[in-house]
Amino acid sequence: MARPLAYARSYVAHLPVAARRLLAGACVLALGAVAYGIYVPVNHLLGKSCMHKGATSVTHHGSNGECVGITDGAYVFHSSLRDVEDTIRQENRSVVKEHPTNYVSVVLLLPISPDKGSIMSMPNALEQLQGAYTAQHYANRNNVKGLTPYIQLLIGSDGYQANGWQTAVSAIEDGGKQHIAAVAGFGLSLSGTESAIRDLTTHDIPAFGATLTSDNYDNIKGFVRASPSNADNAAAALAYVQSDYKRAVLVEDGNTGDSYDVTLVSGFKKFSAIPGHQIVGVEPYDTSERDRDGQSADERQRHQTEVATRIAQMTTNICSAQPAVVLFAGRGQDIGVLVHAFSNTCLDKKIRIVSGDDVTNLPDSPQLRADLASGHVTVDYAGVAHPGEWSAGVAHDAGHSEQQRDGAEGFATFSGAFTPLFPHGYLGDGNAMMAYDATLTAVTAIRLTNQDQPEPDAVLNELGAIQGGGAVYGSSGPIGFTANYQTSKTGSNPVGKPIPIIRLTARGNPAVLAVKWPAQAPPVG
């Protein structure tokens, strides 16, 4: 961060002689490099810190110098996040000043990156920050299993595809002065995300997933999530389309480092287990190189072009297999390539693509809207949340009227808190709702401890209490857990979480087609 010249002179003057000589030498090296046309980032010569002040510990990571770590809002990870970060910072200042012995911090950790290849879009990051702040603002003014402790919300980033997770997690685990009691969010089911969660929970810091759906997270001690698993999401999607299609083409990403893709492939392969149904074709592609850490922008663009070329080639075989639903087991950003590839091919047939919740990371663009407007291709997905899932007239599976009522009540509470704070905020992709739910679940566990400033291990001990009377009335439905990691293979998962089936539209506002509930799901509230 740049300092005024006068401040800089004062800063240097107070350095020890040896340090001043080192600084002068670094400057000479930098100037010499510039003279020969060599780019040497000054931060690599003078240190790795982006900002280290108060509750902020943010450090450069990787070849692109991306900043990762945690902040109370003082450091802005991206210009599009500035307004919401400033708002969070103001709330944090009030909490720390007015309740110095009666507050704890919740970190919202996301893979925030402006890189064009980033799976998590910047609009997604913005929406999740808005949702988490709504939970903080609401909890600091209302009874959420108690009125205290108050909540400071720290913003964390582990960078491009969560590759900077070690630096971010170190900042969290070293943040004792901030009274960090829990970490929420996490964003993407990537190898770095899983490593971060396992490291945090090994150090007895509870973790609360928002939009993580990979089956790899089904049973991690100390971790719970507000979202359903890919196994449940895939089952819901297949249950919805099985009456319309007996045949399917499976599009699968072979990136083994992305457990979202891997487990969605497993879920969609069960289409063949439905009596009278079969997968008649498989179209593979691979994003491993595109997601790899430590490459230049040119390298990443080359790999992106290679992925797009491969996906565009799939239209011939998919068209030949019709009628067959296209089960897309890959990231949302890649679906747009396939949709556009069908804009000038196979025009005499209707193509239906079905995928998982990462469709929310498919950027809304004029091109996408134009491709969908023809009605030639439709894109449906099993989501994790949508404001329309509680609207009158939306079909829910039978036998869930009580949970449906609780879900509508939870969404009304969320909407009543969110809308005044962000009157122009977007809810259609469910990202804000899920960040709110994960953060509110963390607050619930914190307040169930009945302590002024509980340690993380005390919060960890309350995860099993979030059921029955301790369930969370989330915006995406009632949230409850058994958190029984010893005897259950799904101790981290919400019990009986509703799954909206959603369709993209040419108007840019996804529409709910139906809501599916996991089979024989017991009530949680």
Image (spheres, rainbow, N blue to C red):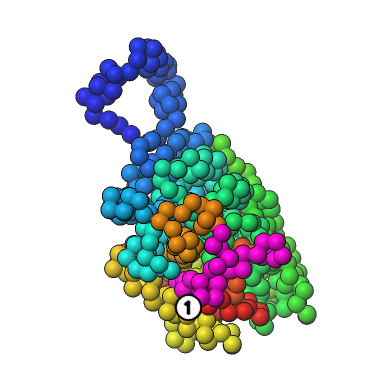
Q: Nearer the viewer, residue 192 or 334?
A: 192
Quarter of the image that includes the N terminus = top left
The reply to whether residue 469 is in sight is yes
Is residue 202 shown above or below 373? above
Assign a secondary structure to mark 1: helix
Q: Provide residue 511's location: percent of width, then percent of height.
A: 47, 76
Q: Amino acid at mark 1?
A: Gly
Q: Provide residue 228's location: percent of width, then percent of height.
A: 59, 68
Name the image quarter holding residue 520: bottom right
User: Pointer 1: what residue?
Assistant: 407
Structural crowding at the residue carrying mark 1, measured as other residues with C-alpha within 10 Å and reported as few (<14), some (14–19) or many (≥20): many
Give the magenta-colored segment's residue range: 461-490
Q: Residue at x 59, y 87 (%)?
A: 399
What is the magenta segment's predominant secondary structure?
loop
Q: Residue at x 41, y 46 (%)?
A: 178
Answer left or right for 267 relative to 295. Answer: right
Residue 508 on the magenta span: no
Can you name the residue that lies furthest to the front here?
A: 451
The reply to whether residue 122 is in sight is no
Q: Provide residue 268's location: percent of width, then percent of height.
A: 69, 67
